[in-house]
Image: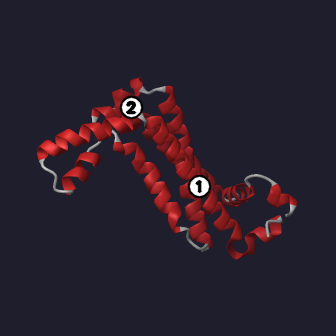
Amino acid sequence: MTASRSSHLHYERFAVGAAFAGRAYLLFFLALSASVSALYMFLLPSLPLGALVPYAIQFLTPVQASFALVFGVLLSLVATLNIYAFKMRTSSVKGVTAGSIIASLVNGLCCTPLIPSLIAMTGASTPVLYAISPRLQAFFEFNSQYFYALSVALLLISVHYLSRSITACCDVGKGAGLE
């Protein structure tokens, strides 16, 4: 095993360095990170209200603020690396996009119409819907930190697989000692 292989995050460092060598990718990443983080700063405390309302930001908890920042940066990094990989014509990693979408949806399981809609699609009657839906939504609300951690883990896995795909593509990694 070479010295570069034994270092941690070598795929990620190479892929991010290669993508951010282009100023457009860096600017896109910064703008998207700020936008997604700001959106989540408003979205997370708004979930119990059932609508995106600006005044809900006053109820933002430190856990939600931290998650909003981390999620904004990771989701933006995945989007930027996906665009870079597409432009390089790397082989696509199908699970990367699915993992990113799942990571985004996990946060909508509490206090949104997603769970009641899924239950209704099964053909359940209104009394069944009202009996099951609040319990499921409460479960997701009370365990939200675990689901935040799951979302972050899915995005980190996405970044890793994208980075590995970018590094392996077209012998790009050979010049950096990553063969």
Q: Is residue 111 visible?
A: no
Disc ID at residue 157? 1
Q: Residue at x 46, y 50 (%)?
A: 103
Q: 28 and 106: which one is in front?
A: 106
70 and 1: which one is in front?
Answer: 1
Locate residue 15, reporting x and y percent: 69, 60
The tag earlier along the polypeptide, 2 or 1, is: 2
| Residue located 54% across and 33% down the image | 66
Q: Residue at x 73, y 53 (%)?
A: 9
Instruction: Inspect the image, locate mark 1, and give the three-letter code of the amino acid beneath it.
Output: Ile
Mark 1 surroundings within 10 Å by alpha-carbon count, few (fewer than 14), some (14 through 19), many (20 or more): some
Q: Quadrant of residue 25?
A: bottom right
Which element is circle 1 on? helix
Query: In the image, which disc is placed on residue 45?
Result: 2
Residue pictured at 51% horizontal, 46% vertical = 150
Percent coordinates x, y for residue 6 in the rendering: 82, 56
Residue type, numbered disc 2: Pro
SS at badge 2:
helix
Q: Which of 175 and 126 lies nearest the eye of the viewer?
A: 126
Which quadrant of the structure image shows residue 101?
bottom left
